[in-house]
Amino acid sequence: MTPPLDQSKPRFPIQNECIYLNHCGVSPLHPGAAAAARQWDETQMRSGIGVFAKLGDPTLAVRRAAAQLLGVPHDDLSFLRNTAEGLSLVANGLPLEPGDRIVSYLHEYPSNHYPWRLQATRGATLELLPDRPCGSGLPEGQPRGFELEDLERLLRAGRVRAVALSHVQFTSGFMVDLAAVGRLCREHDAWLIVDAAQSLGAVPLRPLEWGIDVIAASGWKWLLGPMGSGLLYTNPRLRAVLKCTMAGADLMEQGDDYLNHAWQPHRDGRFFEYSTANMASAAALAACIQEAQLHFGPECIATETSRLRRLLLERLDPYRFLRVQFPGPGSPILSWAVPQADRVARCATKSGVTVTQRGGYLRTAPHFYNTDDEILRAVDVLHQAVDAVQRDAE
């Protein structure tokens, strides 16, 4: 039996360098992932193509691990390079016609915005949910979130083919109720397409239960994987109607029978794995998921990260740090309205606490391996950073 999470936290090398609270940006690489990538590269160096006989296919390993994490068949997973690649393959492959509508949110991350804007070339229109208060004490003029009533209104107007939303907004930390959105999409026969870059690895996702048709996520945030790695979940019903927009040898069922040019594309998750993947990255991401997410369990990781966020909330001075908060479950990202958030972030990072600024907010994002002592020391540094920036402004 795996020991309780709070008694078995792994030690990350970065903890010897700084207090890292930027898992919503680029996370430190899981030590097991670095070891898996090195093993792959060294074996390829010594064995060439024999690396596959010795270590197996890492893309299959990562699909199986990610499928277990999401509670879906591994045939519904694809290993890709990033969120944008997955969303672009889906957006460009959807059977859209002039007059069809796509709904998203005004302040989406670019990876979940530009692929949908491109569909204007096919006559589809992108309609953006307006920014709403969604809670109390939120600053005007900065990204906040949206209301389900606005989504329902747009769906009722008809011809919405896809709803493309981030599970967690990268600026404010607003986390959408995917179960509620999934019900609305099913009622109005719209595909639900989710950018989970800011949630997969931090909170459990249940695509089958919530009616999600697509999940795209990068591997180097909450999954603690290598940069340039990503995952795509698609359900079979969606794949059955998608057209192919990228093709290569790996797309075809005939495999390495390269002179057989029959059009026989895979119809499982390999439909999106059209050409040679970065095998070392695949091995690394598989190791991340196996040694962290599946070892401790997504529920335990979510519970521990939530506890660390509560500790941060309890200790940060509310007069210096105005929390951007919303109704519903806690988001992996804690965003704060502070004057000159960019300068505060730079000051804190220089003092050994890595945080970021996006959309005018200061973002803090602890992960399960952070310790209570790190959080308490980070609070002191953040208080000092705010005070220093305020003194400089006077």
Image (cartoon, rainbow, N blue to C red):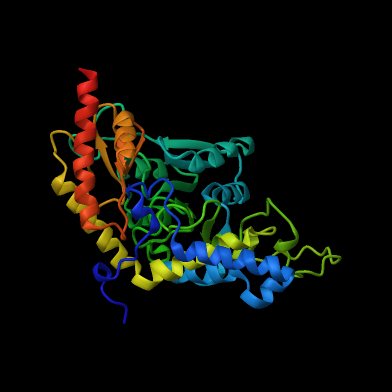
Q: Is residue 41 above or below residue 221?
A: below
Asked if residue 236 can be seen in this view, the reply is no
Q: Is residue 250 above or below residue 193?
A: below
- Residue 88 drawn at (x, y percent): 58, 47
Q: Outermost residue toward the top?
A: 394
Asked if residue 286 can be seen in this view, the reply is yes
Asked if residue 41 lies left or right of residue 106, the reply is right
Q: Outermost residue toward the right?
A: 259
- For the C terminus, the quadrant is top left
Asked if residue 27 lies left or right of residue 369, the reply is right
The answer to which quarter of the image holds residue 290 is bottom left
- For the point 59% across and 64% down, the residue is 269
Q: Nearer the viewer, residue 382 or 94?
A: 382
The tally of labels here is: 0
- Residue 278 drawn at (x, y percent): 63, 58
Q: Nearer the viewer, residue 329 or 356?
A: 356
- Residue 146 drawn at (x, y percent): 32, 40
- For the point 45% across and 66% down, the residue is 289
- Residue 57 drawn at (x, y percent): 63, 71
- For the point 71% across and 63% down, the residue is 250
- For the N terminus, the quadrant is bottom left
Q: Outermost residue toward the bottom?
A: 1
Q: Nearer the viewer, residue 199 or 309?
A: 309
Q: Outermost residue toward the front?
A: 16
